[in-house]
Amino acid sequence: MKELDKEYTLGVYKSIINEKCKINNNEFLIISNNSIVNASFENVVMVDGSFIDVLNTVKKYIEDGNTLVTHPLPASIRMMFSPVRSVILIKKDISDSQETNIKSEQDMYLNIITESIDKYKSVLGKRNIDLKNKSDYEKIDYDLTVSAVEENNFINAFKNI
Amino acid sequence: MSEKKVLYYLNQFFGQIGGEEKADIEPICKEGAIGPAQAFEEKLNGKAKVIATVICGDNYFNENREKAIEFLNKVNDDIKPDIVVAGPAFNAGRYGMACQGVAEFFNKKNIPVVSGMYEENPGLDESKKIAYVVKTADSAAQMRNALPVMAKITLKLLDGEVCKPQEDGYFAQGKRLTVFSEKSGSVRAVEMLMKRLKNEEFETELPMPVFDAVEPADAIKDLSKATIALVTTGGIVPHGNPDRIQSASAQKWGKYDVSKLDKLTGEYCTIHGGYDPVYANQEPDRVVPLDAFREFEKEGKIGKVYDWFYTTTGTGTAIGNSIKFGSEIGEELKAAGVDGVILTST
Amino acid sequence: MKLELRRIHINSIEFGSETKIEGEKLIIDKESLIEELEKIPNVKSIKIDLAMPGEKTRIIPVKDVIQPRYKVEGTPGFAGVTSDVKPHGDGIVNIIEGAAIVTIGDIVGFQEGIIDMWGEGAKWTPFSKTCNIVVDISVPEGIEPHEHEETCRLVGLKASELVGLAAKGLTPSDVEVFEMGDNAEETKKYPNLPKVVYVEMLISQGLLHASYIYGVDSAHILPTFLHPNEELDGAVISGNCVAACDKITTYQHQNNAVIRELYKLHGKEINFLGVVLVPEMTTLNGKFVSCDYTAKLCKMLGADGVIISEEGYGNPDSDLVMICSRVEKLGIKSVLITDECSGWDGMSQPLTDIAKEAVAVISTGNVSHVIELEKADRVLGDPEAVANIAGGWAGAYNPEDGTMKCELNAVIGATSEIGTHNATVELY
């Protein structure tokens, strides 16, 4: 069979491809330097720069009181060499406002982003960022972001009732 | 194999020049092996020779690093050693720092360096990364135990052999190298689990770093009524350094009455050996901000500045000493009713 | 459950007119194999090559490696993926030992995954020692990456079954039996042995970073409990195609080294309760849910000790350490298996996430360790992928003699975090 058979699929990919993932734009923001992510979601803070610039911007937003939804680093080493990265955060006015919890959670997120930046630098070392395959990385990063949004929707469905 | 050339480095004491009173002597280079270098050479079994010994005062090296390095550079050009041996410094802090300086210089020239120190020597942390620092006792009485170990490593390195910290008796450099083990990872994991379940001893392959966390004290409730003391490890002392606080590897701290002063400029200077002193000497308030705090006092932002300020030198100071100084100073401040401390470092 | 693994050892492969095994030689009917595989939807064409140990052949980029097997008795194929959903773990399997199906073909341009069949590179991957049947899959234009990945996955699995047919009807003498009842039975038999659970973390984050349990994508599930026989029989397959060094290939799932080692001690020194598969979630809340649940599952099972293995690097390190500290706080002793990143000179801090509870760790190697690879006589796959590695940093490639410097993270299975091989890290 040489032609593309769009009717054949084992997974649930159709729902992802056909339907834009729902993300509550009043609650979330995505810090990214990925043009596909920028085009697909609202509330994207578009970073003009590379992976490390995205991480540094995430750090500023956390210091400012916003909280992390996704982990700043990807799960595989190869993705660390990507020129693009997207990280999802919850806006600070929305996050839980229990006074006692905020400070220790804030510390935890700061720890995570600082350690992530250190780890990123140590893995990258003197390597070049892989710019040649940028559009492929953008596709994968976009998909991983969509995956993360779905995951978030499962777990955080009724956070703010 | 042609005889290899060893260059030996000693301080003024082991170099048989003199004691503490000679700690300021400039470096000299003597032909052949001097002092402990002779006993060391015997252990080389004729495979290498100590061509020359450099002897330098501990204070001189630490306070005139550039000139000392220049001297080493010249010696290196003249002699072209195959390997350099420094110390052993045991627990002598300034000697250890000097050995560190020697190690850094020759490391840049890709010449291996062997040394020996006690685990608390402040020169150890940095030198162990770039030199093979043998584990020694804390007193020079153990010289005859340290030299053979240093000699063995020296011969191995000259032969191009790989050295291992456990086997060869030196402090691990911190390099994590990927090698093949005889057993697969899964076998090693299961064996380690069995040891844990049986409460037997085991050795982890990835030690977790240990952090020494200090609990912060409670916040000051009303700053405008608080007495704030100024403490520094920036080595700020009155002109003339009356208490002879060391420029590196401090053995003591000092306290000075600043109750009548509005700023430190004019009366104080720096003796810290770890940073460029020009700006601190011009205005020591840059390191200990007495001037700024006097203003806060006048404006009522703080209650008052404590009458005494405390000082010592941070660079190369042993952790053991730092803990001691901190506790002693802290006790005095607490007894005096001080509420908070501004601690400046450099 | 009782699983009998029977191994037919081969040490060479040839193309011939019929797929069968003659002595220690595997013969493959290339045309029929290609014809069958090309029937799979969205396959444009298939190319099959052979790579034998010792040849100066380089295979890159590798998508997955699968062991060819034939199910004599029991649930055939890979339930939920290539065959109907039925439980795995019982029956008799004929395994063609010494052979492997290697699927290649990049779904994205930056895939790595090298298998060198000779030289320095061969030392670092377990698949330089297997006779490899290299399957190159081409897909039609316009295909989305998801569909592409799925197609490649199906082709690899199907190829392993088709080649496995060569083992049909044979009764080899090398037989290994994995027999274990349910927890209540086993605990009754061995009441005094310490109970051990194997916690296996699986990468579960999305496209090219997925794992499948009975065909279910592990991205949106809670940690789940498996009888060890199920994984040995093909219940878990890999959809992870990006990271090379610590990716758990389907072959490695089929031969899970930790499960095999724990099984050896079952009934003698430990009471091996089973396997908890843990998805590595992307969101922090997801991680908390996953790690809390895993610790609770281990506690409810009554585990005295656990071995925790990781898949991946970077954000899964935080899951690894979270699970460790949670189980230790519940009084369960843990041993972790992970790779590390200590930089080119080995002097950098290996893991940034630390928990003081992680006192027993097996390190499977530094992913940044640099090795030198000679020029290959033959490259199966995409020469561009070679350029990706060679262009990794200035000086990585020497145009005069064609040697390349390559970090271990590009070699398949080099720092396998389920401990399939012998790399470790020593402090110097």
Image (spheres, rainbow, N blue to C red):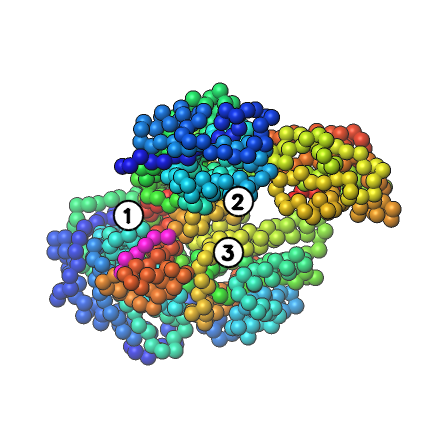
Circle 2 crowding by C-alpha within 10 Å: few under 14, some 14–19, many from 20: some
Task: Give the distance between the C-alpha atoms of the residues marked 3 and 2, in whole angstroms.
Answer: 16 Å
Residue at 17 percent of width and 45 percent of height? C173
- Numbered badge on residue A120: 3
* Residue A136 pos. (x, y %): 43, 70
What are the residue bounds of the magenta stretch?
C370-375
Q: Secondary structure at mark 3?
A: helix
Instruction: Report the chain holding disc 2.
Output: C
Whether the magenta-drawn stretch holds residue C24 is answered as no
Residue B163 in sight here: no
Which quadrant would residue B182 be assigned to in this image? top left
Instruction: Report the chain holding disc 1.
Output: C
Q: Are the residues at dot 3 and dot 1 in contact (C-beta closer than 8 Å)? A: no
Q: Nearer the viewer, residue B64 or B104?
A: B64
* Residue B324 pos. (x, y %): 65, 29
Which residue position is annotated with label 2?
C354
**Which residue lies most toward the top here?**
B141
Q: Secondary structure at mark 1?
A: strand
Residue at 25 percent of width and 61 percent of height? C376
In this picture, residue B38 sits left or right of residue C24: right
Residue at 45 percent of width and 62 percent of height? A128
Circle 1 crowding by C-alpha within 10 Å: few under 14, some 14–19, many from 20: many
Three-letter amino acid code at disc 3?
A: Tyr
* Residue C69 pos. (x, y %): 24, 56
In this picture, residue C301 sits left or right of residue A63: left
* Residue B87 pos. (x, y %): 47, 30
Three-letter amino acid code at disc 1?
A: Leu
Which residue position is annotated with label 1?
C3
Foreground: disc 1 or disc 2: 2
Foreground: disc 3 or disc 1: 3
